[in-house]
Image (tube, helix red, strand yellow):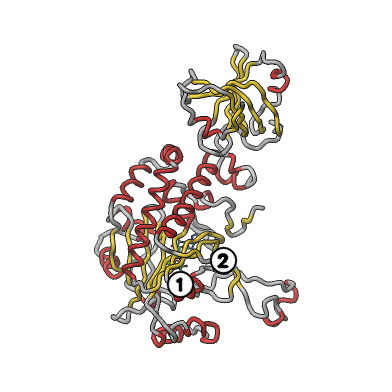
Amino acid sequence: MSRSGSVLEVLRMDPAAAGGTVTVNGWVRTRRDSKAGVSFIELNDGSCLRNLQIVAEHGHPGFQDLLAEVTNGCSLSIEGEVVASPGKGQAVEVHATRIQLLGAADPGTYPLQKKRHSFEFLREIAHLRPRTSTIGAAARVRSRISFAIHELLEARGFLYVHTPIITASDCEGAGNVFRVTTLDPGQESAAMPSDDFFGRPAYLTVSGQLQAEIYALALGKVYTFGPTFRAENSNTSRHLAEFWMVEPEMAFCDLQGDLELAEVLVKHCIQAVLDRCGEEVDFFERFMEPGLRTHLERTVRESFEVISYTDAVDLLTKSGEVFSFPVVWGGDLQAEHERYLTEKVFRKPVAILDFPRSLKPFYMRVNDDDRTVAAMDILVPRIGEIIGGSQREERRDVLLEQMRLRSIPLEEYRWYVELREWGSVPHAGFGLGLERMVQFCTGIANIREAIPFPRTPGHAEL
Ligand code: 4AD
Ligand code: MG
């Protein structure tokens, strides 16, 4: 009886107990022929980083002709004996008794060569890049982190709420929204919003927070987790136009509770990667970031640093360090300031609390000093901001004042104000960027490699 197995399952078989027949399917990564009339085929099926070595004897009936077509990138179904491998690098290998070519790959045209390709080149072949070790490993890490997020929040009693992707509100108020319209480009300028599909202006969501707040104020602890969109014309290694964000929102919760959950969630994601993606961590440590494993282990073990914005500004101005952007109270922290804090001063994640009111959106709770809001940004070494969150303004009058200062039309946010009129409670939440979390766990330098299909200014492949 032949069992069917993934490459990972076969590789996990005990070589001492090996024996028996398996069927295994995959794509050929490389192939090498020995003078003794044997081909060694490296088969990968995406189940793990490692390849399975298939040994095919040229003398086996029918193999000679078939092997001529076994080239990099072709797909095979192999039946064979699992045996302990005498070679280095693997415990078991499969001695083929039957090889079926499922799909050939013309070596003259197949773009993936054995050599290392640049990530820029791989982005141009978005349909093939997951077949490379790095993008495959990134996909596995990303999947495990996503699962770990659901796992932790489910265990803590959160409900998963699906907030809309098409929305009528610009949560962050930063004005970098994509419009959703069915009007012809020619018609657009002349047409009234009421002529459009929804009868009003509509956008792709920049954050599910405001809708998550509605559910938190009815169900207690909720989270939304989905794609978010920002038309940011910033071509950096940490910005995407489409990225995934998990946003927990908790009723009866203040900034302290928010910070606690954020730290637990980040650590849970890292621990999941350490526990379930050990091979990938070793791989990324070797090719991306020396010391990655130690760094991740230390992050899980140590408490995050917590500092107020005001103290951070103080620390930066007194540091004696020369920055390209001056540090002034009331100004945004630049990447160089963030890096200085996380990489030079504290050497670990840093939660910065209580930002100046003017720097943050209208919904953040105004502190007693009247100058700052109960905001929380969590910065990590190398990446910078990985989490942005806050306690929300639950006092109707203060919220109205915040909106007035920013000229936010009351009409569009009446429902948000009404939540403060009827049964308002203190509540808080945050957003964790999934791709930045993937970057942190892998050392991937450019965020474009942390998502299957990156969308950035000028780029939307497929
Ligand atoms: O700090 P942000 O803008 O916060 C919000 O959107 C809040 N409404 C979240 C909340 O409180 N529910 O974004 C949160 C996180 C950032 O810290 C970052 O990790 C990620 O989302 N992020 C991006 N990731 C990739 N590309 C971009 N353009 C991103 N913008 C934000
Ligand atoms: Mg932010």
Identify the disc placed on residue 439.
none
Q: Residue furthest top?
A: 36
Between residues 83 and 106, which one lies in front from this camera angle?
A: 83
**Residue at the spot of label 2:** 231
Mark 1 and mark 2 lie on one chain; the one further toward the N terminus is 1
Q: Residue at x 42, y 83 (%)?
A: 423
Q: Position of residue 36 (x, y in %)?
A: 60, 11
- Amino acid beneath label 1: Leu
Quarter of the image containing the N terminus? top right
Q: CA distance from mark 1 to mark 2?
A: 32 Å
- Amino acid beneath label 2: Ala
Q: In this orientation, does residue 108 appear?
A: no
Is residue 30 positioned above or below 175 on the image? above
Q: Position of residue 349 (x, y in %)?
A: 33, 56
**Residue at the spot of label 1:** 219
Dividing the picture into quarters, in which one does residue 108 lie? top right
Is residue 140 positioned above or below 411 on the image? above
Pointer 2 residue Cβ closer than 8 Å to ligand 1: no
Q: Residue at x 67, y 26 (%)?
A: 70
Q: Residue at x 51, y 33 (%)?
A: 50
